[in-house]
Image: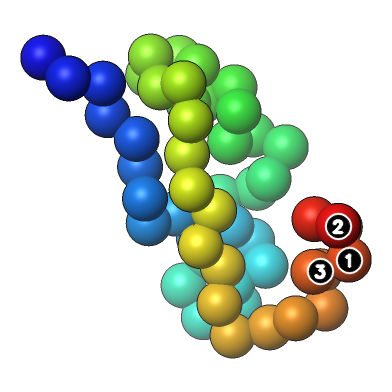
Amino acid sequence: MPEFVHLHLHSEYSLLDGMCRIKDIPKRAKELGMKAVALTDHGVMFRSSFIF
């Protein structure tokens, strides 16, 4: 089976539909055997400085 990479994941910074806390995402992804995820927050820009 090919490896799965989740390409639609909203964190706590997507105010309308985000639920995952950023600090918990890597641990959970590892538990599920995922080597990568794509964080696709939307609706706000106040945390964009965290990425850069």
The residue tagged with tag 3: helix, strand or loop? Answer: loop
Image location of residue 34, percent across then percent down: 40, 22
Closer to us: 21 or 52: 52
As drawn, the label of residue 49 is 1
As drawn, the label of residue 10 is none
Q: What whole-number distance in Å separates the C-alpha atoms at marks 1 and 2? A: 5 Å
Q: Quadrant of the C terminus?
A: bottom right
Query: Does 40 appear above or below 14?
Result: above
Q: Quadrant of the N terminus?
A: top left
Mark in front: 2 vs 3 = 2
Q: Is residue 19 visible?
A: no
Instruction: Say whether disc 2 or disc 3 marks the residue closer to the N-terminus.
Output: 3
Query: Does residue 26 appear left or right of residue 47 in this picture?
Result: left
Closer to us: 13 or 40: 40
Query: Does residue 33 appear left or right of residue 11 in this picture?
Result: left
What residue would you read off at disc 3? Answer: 47
Q: Residue at x 68, y 45 (%)?
A: 22
